Amino acid sequence: MWIEQIVWDLDDDVGGNVQHIGEHGLTIEEVEEVLFAATEVLASNSSGRPLVFGTTSSGKYIAVVFDVIDEDPLVVYPVTAYEPEE
């Protein structure tokens, strides 16, 4: 998967993806690391959206759920990200 761009809401957007991932203890940088390194895309069991797993440089293993905004070039919008339970 070759992601060209990741779309983020403004930091102060209360309903935005930046604040949402922050509620899960994650940063934009951690989510971007996993998205840009992703090689396998699965489907979320709860939403059916695309889902990737990966390890951040800080050692966190996270899941990132996203929407595809455009396919050529590939532009994605992270919906949520979290550290999955074992």
Image (cartoon, helix red, strand yellow):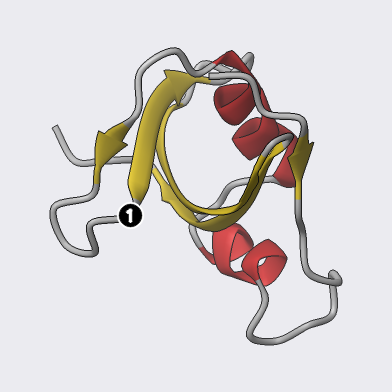
Residue 46 location, quadrant: bottom left
> Who's the residue at 13% across and 53% down the image?
45
> Who's the residue at 59% across and 47% down the image?
26
Residue 77 image point, x, y percent: 62, 55
The residue that label 1 is drawn on is 49
In the picture, measured across the screen, residue 14 lies left or right of residue 44, that is right
The extreme bottom residue here reads: 14
Residue 22 location, quadrant: bottom right
Q: Residues within 10 Å of mark 1 (few under 14, many from 20)?
A: some
> Who's the residue at 57% across and 58% down the image?
21
In the picture, measured across the screen, residue 9 lies left or right of residue 55, that is right
Residue closer to the observer: 3 or 70: 70
Up/down of 13 relative to 42, above or below: below
> Who's the residue at 67% across and 76% down the image?
16
Residue 28 image point, x, y percent: 73, 45
* Quadrant in which the C terminus appears: top left
Residue closer to the observer: 1 or 13: 1
Residue 17 location, quadrant: bottom right
Residue closer to the observer: 62 or 71: 71
Up/down of 48 relative to 30, above or below: below
